[in-house]
Amino acid sequence: MTAPDDALQACSSCGSTVLTRLPLVLTDGTDVTFISCHVCEVRAWFSQDEAGGWTSIPIASVLERSARKPR
């Protein structure tokens, strides 16, 4: 997974560039990047779309995709 492009280099809420970026692969195989702002503490999850752009995904979707399937 590549790092998010320039659109994700600054906080969408306060504009700070002091961010934590954590790329992960969810249980269902989805590549995502978790981004947290050190200044205003906004947190967001992003996944890369087919065109190579980054789309914000809701936490409910992240949790659903991360859940273990019942045996």
Image: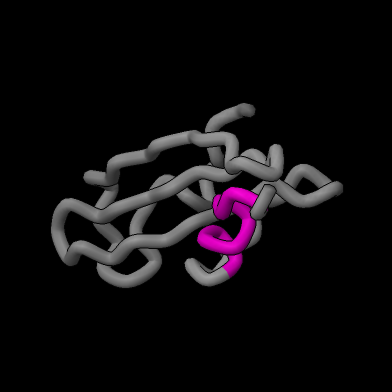
Residue 4: where, in percent of width, then height?
55, 40
Q: Is residue 36 left or right of residue 2?
A: left
Rendered-image quadrant of the N terminus: top right
Residue 3 in the figure: left or right of residue 35: right
Is 8 in the magenta? no
Q: Is residue 35 left or right of residue 42?
A: right
- Considering every residue shown, the one lying at the far front of the view is 71
Spot the residue most to the left: 39
Rendering coords of residue 57 (x, y %)? 59, 65
Q: Residue at x 54, y 32 (%)?
A: 3
- Residue shown at the point (55%, 59%) measured from the top left: 62
Q: Is residue 5 above or below residue 38?
A: above
* Name of the residue lying farthest toward the right: 50
Dividing the picture into quarters, in which one does residue 12 lie?
bottom left
Magenta-tinted stretch: 61-69
Q: Residue 27: x, y in percent?
A: 61, 41
Q: Confirm whether the magenta stretch covers residue 63.
A: yes
